[in-house]
Structures are given as C-alpha cells and as structure tokens.
Image (spheres, coloured by chain):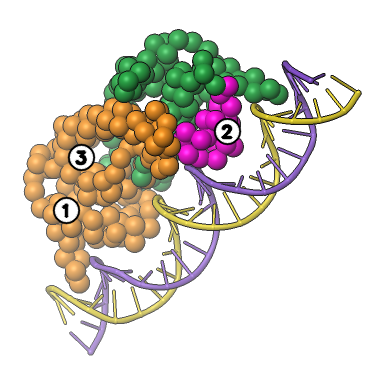
Chain colours: A green, B orange, C yellow, D purple
Amino acid sequence: MQFSSRLPIAVHTLLVIAVFKDQYKITSDFIAGSVGVNPVIVRNVLGQLKSANLVEVTAGIGGAALNRPPAEITLLDVFRAVEVDEDLFHFHEHPNPDCLVGKSIHNILGTKLDDIKKTAELQLKSITLQSLLDSLPNK
Amino acid sequence: MQFSSRLPIAVHTLLVIAVFKDQYKITSDFIAGSVGVNPVIVRNVLGQLKSANLVEVTAGIGGAALNRPPAEITLLDVFRAVEVDEDLFHFHEHPNPDCLVGKSIHNILGTKLDDIKKTAELQLKSITLQSLLDSLPNK
DNA sequence: ATTAGTTGTAATGTCAATACTTACAACAAA
DNA sequence: TTTGTTGTAAGTATTGACATTACAACTAAT
C-alpha cells in the first residue's frame, strides 16, 4: 500500500511554475506536458493547491502562479493540500471489548503509530520548495 | 490513503498468542473472536507471520505459538511480514524527459521521500512486542 | 460584441486492493 | 475413523486512483 501520486504531481507542478514562470504562460496543458498526465488531473491538483492558498490560478485566460516565495512552501503544506488527514494505518473496527487485548489494542498501538506519522510530518515540513529548486541541475 | 489493517491485526494476533498461550489453545477462531474479523482473515495473516518465521502454526489439530520471545519481535518484523516492500509514494510514471523538471523530479524528490520511509522503519524497529505487552493493563 | 483559449467540474470507465464470506480438501491427534 | 482445525481457492462488494470526454463559465484581445 502506498500514497497516491498526488503529492509527487503537486510538487512537480509547483516546480514547473517556479522554473518557467518568466518564460511561458503556465497553463494546465503546459504543466501536463511536463508531468505526463491528463490536463484534468493537473487542474484538479491546482484546485487543491489553490484552496490551500499555495497558488493563484486565473480562470478564463489561464495561467498559474505561486502565492508565496518557494522558501516558504514546505512539502507538508503540499501534502496537506492534496491528501486527506487520517491515521497512517487503518484499524480493525470491532476488537472484542471483553478481551484484555481487544479493549486495549487501539490505545497502545495507536499512540505508537501516531508518533510515526508525526515524525514523518516534521520531515515533510523540513523540505521546502526552494531546496528542491536548488537541487535541480544547471538552474 | 492509509495502510491496510493487516499490521494492526497481526500485532493483535501476536499479543493474543503471547497473553493467552498458557490458558487456551490459540486457534484462528479464538483469535478472530478477539480481533473481531473473519477467521479466514486471521488464517491468512497467520500464514504471513509463519512465512516470516515469527510463529508456528500446527495444521490439523490447530494452535499457534510464538517462534521467539516477545522482546525479540519488532513491529518492523511484523510490518515486513504483512506488507509488501515498496515506495511510500506512488510516482507518476511518465514525466517528460525533455523537461528540466520532468527529468529530475524522480531523483530529487524520491530520495527525500525515501528518507522518510527509512526513518519510519527505524521507529517500527524500536517497538517490540514485549513493550506492547508491558503496556497492557493489569498484566 | 464576438471570438479564442482556458479553467472548473461533472460524469463515466477501467483497474487494483481491501475485506468479507462460503466452501472444501488436507491434516493431525484422539 | 472421527473430530476439529488449517490452508486455500473462489466469488462478491466496496473503495480509491487515474484517465478521459464533455461542456458551461470565464477573461482578455480583437
């Protein structure tokens, strides 16, 4: 099991905007050409990024732009924009409350697994769009 | 998106074996009664735990037992037994190789996301079955 | 105003994974 | 030989990801 490709697609989208904003008009078709997916997928992701105030999209004539400097956009911002916030692991929903293990499992295992999620979020927060831009070759 | 309930179910299963091994014969029906799922689900999970050498299951007459002391079984062992090993995030598969961003995205983002996975695995490794047993009430 | 190009969104289809259930052959011990 | 259990296969339902088609709403330029 793994996360959908929406985070990678969203990051790719933001990078394209940051890199090419002065050379081209950044339409969903333009982005889709770099990402390699259907333009509708890009428009949906752009809509999520827009709801999270990460980008501005101009309806009609078209064109997307970042809403903040790349140094102030973290992967956690992007992650939260495109993925629903839920527990990392799905728990079985009917453990037996009359059993010592059944009545405790959610409590004792859930807290440990929550810690793992929190650590992952901190790591996502430490990665900025700017740091990814800096990693691009000859840029 | 989240992981399936197989890890929680597997941990629950191992805890039931550890706690009740001296009082009851641990059949898939017995475990299923505590976990609250169909016995076939338990048998499938037990089969995966058996393949990973974490438990012994006696066919025919029935009964499951741990193959090592609870202090020597980590959640990473269990995780690897029940989940396939793959990247945390699914990557879009056709980025444009003629685009600066498209040709680099997998490299620069993939390594960062791999680090997150590795950290999560280290955390899973630090949690033993024994530590969960110690967290159970009045045990 | 009209046109051209784009966005926003709905509807639909395909595919894969999860989870549940029924069914039954293989098995081990009494 | 009987009894209870395991190991698996098969079938169904549900969900989510992703792709695609279609089109109304919108904006700027002509």
Q: Are marks 1 and 3 in contact (CB under 8 Å)?
A: no
Image side of residue B28 versus residue A55, left or right: left
Mark 2–mark 3 distance (CA, rounded to whole Å):
45 Å
x, y (%) of residue B66? 13, 52
Q: How many marks?
A: 3
Which span is picked out in magenta? Answer: A25-47
Query: Which amino acid type corresponds to the residue marked 3 in the rendered image?
Result: Leu
Residue denoted by label 2 = A29
Residue A50 can be seen, yes or no: no
Name the chief secondary structure element in magenta: helix
Q: In the figure, residue C3 lies in which quadrant? A: top right
Residue B52 marker: 1
Residue denoted by label 3 = B75
Secondary structure beneath dot 2 equals helix
Give the residue displayed 19% in from the left and 50% down from the top.
Answer: B17
Mark 2–mark 1 distance (CA, rounded to whole Å):
48 Å
